[in-house]
Amino acid sequence: MVITPVTIAFFIMAAFTLGGSLGVVTNRNLFHAALYLILALFGAAGLFVLLEAPFLAAVQVLIYVGAISVLIAITIMVTRRIMGVESANRQWPLSALVGLLLAATLGFVIMDRFAGKFPVAGVPDDSLTRLGMALVSYEGMEAYLVPFEVASVLLLAAMIGAIVVARK
Amino acid sequence: MIPLHWYLLVAAGMFALGVYGVLARRNMVAIIMSIELMLNAVNINLVAFWRYMAPENLNGQAFAIFVFTVAAAEAAVGLALIISIYRARETVVAKEIDMLKW
């Protein structure tokens, strides 16, 4: 394995992602867990950059780090009075076992099927333009107009639903 | 260049940690945070497979965008439900919300 700046960046971002995830599920202070969630999501954004998907990295920072994390932080603050510090429930050893088994199975399959694969081709220069076109085009190989509209309706419904549900 | 399985292993670890969080934590906000972790792990997988298997067509990235959309909607509605339940029952512990349990 050759150590290049890209591999170093990958290791840093992977450490952010996995360390942040571990902090989210183990930290007993909920607000600290939310901060760890921001770290993990930021690490994932870094991985998107390394995977040459800059638009997704930007969306990740905007939606997850910017919007969802703030929403979660506000919810924690609103509901903090009763449960500032929590402990894991009684079956946490079983849960840890399930998680470890899942990780082991996934790791085995990944190492069995996908070990040492490298990209088959480079990313086209116009990929960002084509992604934008794909989301609003109706014909061709990459036609996502209908899913795009469905997603818009879903977001509208979620917005109205959230307002109605959370209102007194 | 980084081999594909490194990304997949990071995503698998993130997903397993999310599963553990959903199963082990008692606070509903913590459970939602763990679900976000799992959705994010799926997204890393999608983008990694797009980059390494089929970079010439953008279906992998488009799919990831829809996962983002669903995650955002899920977080908004889920947190609204938590606030609503908190108002009605003064609790955010998943175990104590058992009105529908027979």
Image (cartoon, grey):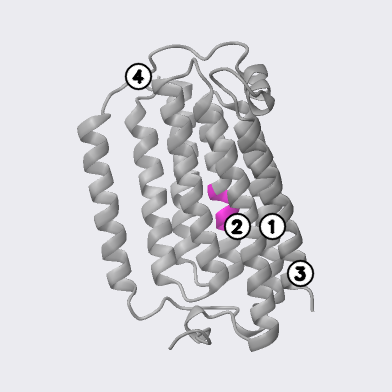
Which amino acid, by three-letter code, is at mark 1? Ala
Q: Which mark is residue A158?
A: 1
| Residue at the image position 23 percent from the left and 31 percent from the top | A113
Spatial CA distance of label 3 from label 2 is: 15 Å
User: Which residue appears at 68% of the width and 86% of the height?
Assistant: B88
Q: Which mark is residue B74?
A: 2
Residue on which the image places disc 3 = A164
Q: Are marks 4 and 1 on the same chain?
A: yes
Question: Residue A128: x percent and y percent?
Answer: 64, 20
Choose top left, top right, bottom left or bottom right for residue A98.
bottom left
Is residue B5 rendered to the left or right of residue A135? left
Question: Which circle's residue, 4 or 1, is located before the other in the chain?
Answer: 4
Q: Which residues are magenta?
A: A36-40
Q: Position of residue A77 (x, y in %)?
A: 70, 72
The majority secondary structure of the magenta stretch comes to helix
- Does the magenta-highlighted stretch encompass residue A39? yes
Q: Gap in Å between the C-alphas at discs 3 and 1?
A: 10 Å
Q: Amino acid at mark 2?
A: Glu
Between the residue at mark 2 and the residue at mark 1, the CA separation in whole angstroms equals 8 Å
Q: Nearer the viewer, mark 3 or mark 2?
A: 3
Q: Which residue is mark 4?
A: A118
Q: Are marks 4 and 3 in contact (CB under 8 Å)?
A: no
Say which amino acid is labelled 4: Phe
Q: Around disc 4, counting alpha carbons within 10 Å, would you say few (fewer than 14), some (14 to 19), or many (20 or more)?
A: some
Disc number lying in front (2 or 1)? 1
> Dot 1 lies on which element?
helix
Determine if marks 3 and 1 fall on one subunit: yes
Nearest the eye: A40 or B94: B94
Give the Cα distance between marks 2 and 4: 34 Å
From the viewer's perspective, is residue A130 above or below residue B32?
above
